[in-house]
Image: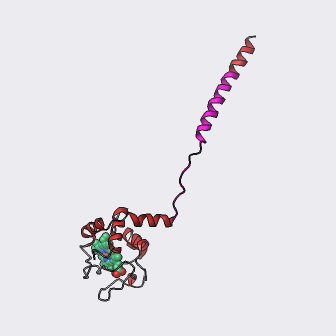
């Protein structure tokens, strides 16, 4: 008789563990609806809408104006109208040979890459500067696209 009781209490324990396991498993596999991951195209249009021209002007003055002005060349070329233009096109500015022959069109995508890592986009170019913060890059690109305040 004792043997039977032992077997039944062991099987009750196993049953309880099994139920516990099953309910935990059910929790694990509950399907939570998630939005689909955005495609790269959605990323760039989202980034476009995140930029703010007024903030971009402030960032430009802080980070770029040491080398760039809208309408005159300094250490870097003048930048008004740069959005949509080909790289290396300011006639009286002495570009690096690398940027001169890069033939990039400055867009959201190319400016994003340039400002993140100029050497990654155009090895051996002469702009020794990068913008680490994504928000600052977006604001700058918006400001450049909006014509630097004109
Ligand atoms: C330390 C000086 C320096 C700073 C700071 C700097 N640049 Fe430049 N930039 C340059 C130089 C030099 C070039 C030309 C590079 C070459 O010829 O390879 C250049 C080129 C560029 C070009 C390409 C222009 C063209 O006509 O193709 C863009 C766009 C640009 N810079 C944007 C910016 C922005 C926006 C900032 C601020 C975040 C910035 N730069 C900060 C020196 C600088």
**In the rendered image, is residue 133 in sight?**
no
The magenta span reads 11-39
| Quadrant in which residue 11 is drawn | top right
Residue 124 pos. (x, y %): 38, 78
Q: Give the residue at x 40% y 77%.
A: 106
Reply yes or no: does residue 12 show up in magenta.
yes
Reply yes or no: does residue 37 show up in magenta.
yes
Left or right: 144 in relation to 102: left
| Quadrant in which residue 70 is drawn | bottom left
Residue 77 pos. (x, y %): 29, 81
Query: Please, is residue 86 above or below residue 55 in the view?
Result: below
Please name whichever residue, 147 or 114, is drawn nearer the observer in this view of the structure: 147
Q: Give the residue at x 40% y 69%.
A: 112
Residue 95 pos. (x, y %): 33, 84
Query: Please, is residue 51 above or below residue 122 in the view?
Result: above
Q: Quadrant for ligand 1?
A: bottom left
Query: Please, is residue 101 above or below residue 144 in the view?
Result: below
Left or right: 141 in relation to 16: left
Which quadrant of the figure contains the N terminus? top right
Left or right: 84 in relation to 57: right
Q: Give the residue at x 29% y 75%.
A: 148
Residue 40 pos. (x, y %): 50, 65
Which quadrant of the figure contains the C terminus? bottom left
């Amino acid at each position: 008789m004792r043997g039977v009781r032992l077997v039944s209490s062991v099987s009750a324990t196993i049953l309880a563990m099994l139920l516990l396991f099953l309910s935990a498993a059910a929790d694990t596999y509950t399907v939570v609806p998630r939005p689909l991951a955005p495609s790269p195209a959605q990323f760039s249009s989202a980034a476009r809408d995140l930029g703010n021209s007024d903030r971009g002007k402030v960032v430009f003055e802080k980070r770029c104006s040491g080398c760039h002005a809208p309408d005159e060349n300094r250490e870097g070329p003048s930048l008004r109208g740069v959005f949509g233009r080909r790289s290396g096109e300011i006639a009286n500015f002495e570009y690096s040979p690398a940027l001169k022959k890069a033939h990039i069109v400055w867009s959201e995508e190319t400016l994003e890459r340039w400002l993140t890592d100029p050497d990654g986009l155009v090895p051996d170019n002469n702009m020794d500067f990068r913008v680490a913060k994504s928000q600052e890059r977006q604001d700058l690109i918006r400001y450049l696209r909006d014509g630097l305040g004109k």
